[in-house]
Image (tube, rainbow, N blue to C red):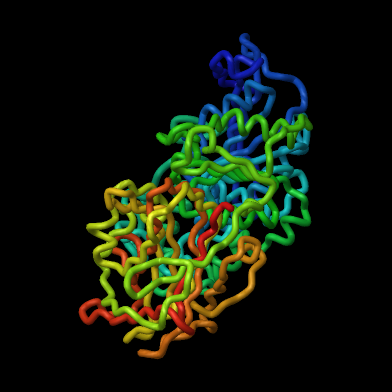
């Protein structure tokens, strides 16, 4: 039944090899066929296991033979799992076209694959999924299609609220080198490319793989064009799709139904990635476990980190999770495991039953017109600021990589409004979601407001910790249980709810600052910098004319006391 035999590194598990067969499974629409590779454990002579096994499925962009985490794949196989890797529609040898990065149509195809697999003699009917980024989003959109035989998902560095990843509180957070408003990612394939053929697709022409590539030629649009049009609101309707993808394709909109299905959900997140805050919020609604490490977007896939004690054996963590969910072998992992950056030895990895941890509380710190940041409300005053788009907060990848090691003073703090505490008398841990509550006016009708939390060392250097942002016209408050669960403001960002600023009139701007866990040593100071522009990754609203930059007034003290709420460990 199976052809290709693949040896597995000794020590991963009791099985020393696997056999692979590839084939098509019908998708959700006529003519859509999903190319699949099935791997079954085998002994040293190449004989496949002849019993029903739990299945772990992996699918998404990049090609089914491009395995970024072979350690996970082969650890699972070596320990008695069937593993399937698929090209989702529009990818590789699969048929069909989708103009979405993670649409419900792709999830519907994988639902068909799951139900087909559950009926095969080699499958026990217990099926899980894993994968990073786009592969994580496909897990969510598969769950949104509610397959009966899906048991568990394991999304890595992907927020179920995709709009918030790219447009936090209405700010277009697209890295400018990606082309901004629809230019696309350099190198994204747009020409005929034939995927790896399945076994029954004959050489030399590979007609099925060739047809799949030919049928989608010229029909695929760069997914980034779909996520970053100018001034996008959450209910923006994609003219090509005919619906609003940030509502229809957004897993966050289906959380109640997903919860009702009882899928078991474990997430992996990285403090230096743009998804961690949203992942923690979603965990509070439907998650069973979440592990947050000192990782950026790519490191979240491997668990590798240069931070002390920051590495995690992702293969063993996946095996532990799927043993629990698919084989019934209990695991003792707590609901929340997180790494505290800069913490002393022995205090870096922490565990909690809830997020935020029960011993962390939001503490107000007030912005002083003299540049101070303290616990008491100052006298009424204000500071003036000219919008500057040359402020350097992020690197070229923006919020996808917030491991920023440079001194923030020269290119950020010197061009922003800065508010700094006195030196801390004792070590202080900041863990949780924070919030900014600003009173401000502008000579423009709109604008971005960015709050950055920094660590100022005794030598004066200042280093990035976390940040949050709001487009002023999206300031209308709304309700969402995910944001309420961590005590921060939520903005729905619907077009009908936009409220332009009245030039010169103060407005209240409240917004979330992304979660983190960070330890300030005694003698260090906490700084909050406020900027209204960013050179790498924050697009200005269309009405902001940088040839005539707006003047912003930030109010401090009295009845308009601007402040930040810092989540500090007691």
Q: Is residue 489 above or below residue 554?
A: above
Whole-percent x and y of residue 359? 63, 52
Who is closer to the viewer here, 402 or 453? 453
Quarter of the image for residue 485 reads bottom right
Who is closer to the viewer here, 335 or 62? 335
Q: In this view, does 301 lie above or below 5?
A: below
Looking at the image, the residue that sits furthest to the top is: 45
Who is closer to the viewer here, 144 or 195? 144
Whole-percent x and y of residue 106? 59, 53
Quarter of the image for residue 380 reads bottom left
- Residue 154 appearing in the image: no
- Report the label total: 0
Whole-percent x and y of residue 25? 64, 42
Looking at the image, the residue that sits furthest to the front is: 425
Q: In which quarter of the image is the N terminus?
A: top right
Q: Residue at x 48, y 81 (%)?
A: 508
- Residue 277 appearing in the image: yes
Give the left or right position of residue 57, taking residue 515 as reference.
right
Whole-percent x and y of residue 291? 59, 42
Q: Residue at x 55, y 38 (%)?
A: 349
Who is closer to the viewer here, 430 or 103? 430
Give the left or right position of residue 412, taking residue 141 as reference.
left
Quarter of the image for residue 45 reads top right
Q: Residue at x 57, y 70 (%)?
A: 490
């Amino acid at each position: 039944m199976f052809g290709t035999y693949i040896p597995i590194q000794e020590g991963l598990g009791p099985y020393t090899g696997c056999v692979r067969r590839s084939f098509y499974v019908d998708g959700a629409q006529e003519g859509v066929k999903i190319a699949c590779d099935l791997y079954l454990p085998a002994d040293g002579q190449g004989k496949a296991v002849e019993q029903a096994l739990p299945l772990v499925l992996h699918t998404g962009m990049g090609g089914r033979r491009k395995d970024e985490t072979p350690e996970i794949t082969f650890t699972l196989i070596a320990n008695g799992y069937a593993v399937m890797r698929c090209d989702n529609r529009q990818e590789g040898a699969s048929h069909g076209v989708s103009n979405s990065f993670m649409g419900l149509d792709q999830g519907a195809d994988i639902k068909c694959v799951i139900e087909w697999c559950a009926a095969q003699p080699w499958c026990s009917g217990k099926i899980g999924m894993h994968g990073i980024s786009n592969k994580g989003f496909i897990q969510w959109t598969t769950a949104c299609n509610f397959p009966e035989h899906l048991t568990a998902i394991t999304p890595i560095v992907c927020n179920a609220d995709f709009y918030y990843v790219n447009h936090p509180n209405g700010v277009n957070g697209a890295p400018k080198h990606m082309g901004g408003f629809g230019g696309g990612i350099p190198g994204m394939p747009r020409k005929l490319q034939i995927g790896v053929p399945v076994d029954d697709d004959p050489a030399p022409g590979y007609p099925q793989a060739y047809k799949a590539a030919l049928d989608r030629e010229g029909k695929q649009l760069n997914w980034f064009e779909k996520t970053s049009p100018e001034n996008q609101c959450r209910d923006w309707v994609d003219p090509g799709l005919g619906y609003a993808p940030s509502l229809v394709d957004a897993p966050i909109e289906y959380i109640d139904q997903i919860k009702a299905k009882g899928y078991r959900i474990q997430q992996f997140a990285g403090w230096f990635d743009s998804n961690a805050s949203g992942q923690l919020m979603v965990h509070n609604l439907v998650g069973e476990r979440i592990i947050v490490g000192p990782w950026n977007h790519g490191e979240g896939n491997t668990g590798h980190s240069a931070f002390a004690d920051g590495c995690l054996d992702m293969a063993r963590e996946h095996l532990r999770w799927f043993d629990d969910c698919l084989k019934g072998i209990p695991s003792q992992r707590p609901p929340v495991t997180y790494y505290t950056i800069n913490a002393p030895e022995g205090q870096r990895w922490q565990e909690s039953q809830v997020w935020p941890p029960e011993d962390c509380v939001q503490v107000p710190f007030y912005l002083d017109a003299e540049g101070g940041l303290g616990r008491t409300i100052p006298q009424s005053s204000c500071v003036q600021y000219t919008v500057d788009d040359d402020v350097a907060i992020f690197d070229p990848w923006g919020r996808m990589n917030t491991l920023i090691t440079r001194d923030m003073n020269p290119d950020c703090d010197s061009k922003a409004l800065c508010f700094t505490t006195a030196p801390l008398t004792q070590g202080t841990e900041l863990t949780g979601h924070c919030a900014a509550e600003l009173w401000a006016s502008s000579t423009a009708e709109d604008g971005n407001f960015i709050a950055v939390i920094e660590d100022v060392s005794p030598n004066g250097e200042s280093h990035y910790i976390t940040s949050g942002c709001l487009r002023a016209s999206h300031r209308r408050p709304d309700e969402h249980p995910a944001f309420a669960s961590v005590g921060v403001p939520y903005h729905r960002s619907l077009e009908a709810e936009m409220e332009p600023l009245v030039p010169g009139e103060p407005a209240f701007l409240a917004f979330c600052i992304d979660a983190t866990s960070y330890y300030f040593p005694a003698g260090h100071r906490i700084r909050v910098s406020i900027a209204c522009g960013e050179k790498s990754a924050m697009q200005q609203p269309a009405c902001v004319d940088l040839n005539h930059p707006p003047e912003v007034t930030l109010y401090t003290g009295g009845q308009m006391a601007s402040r930040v709420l810092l989540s500090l460990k007691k």
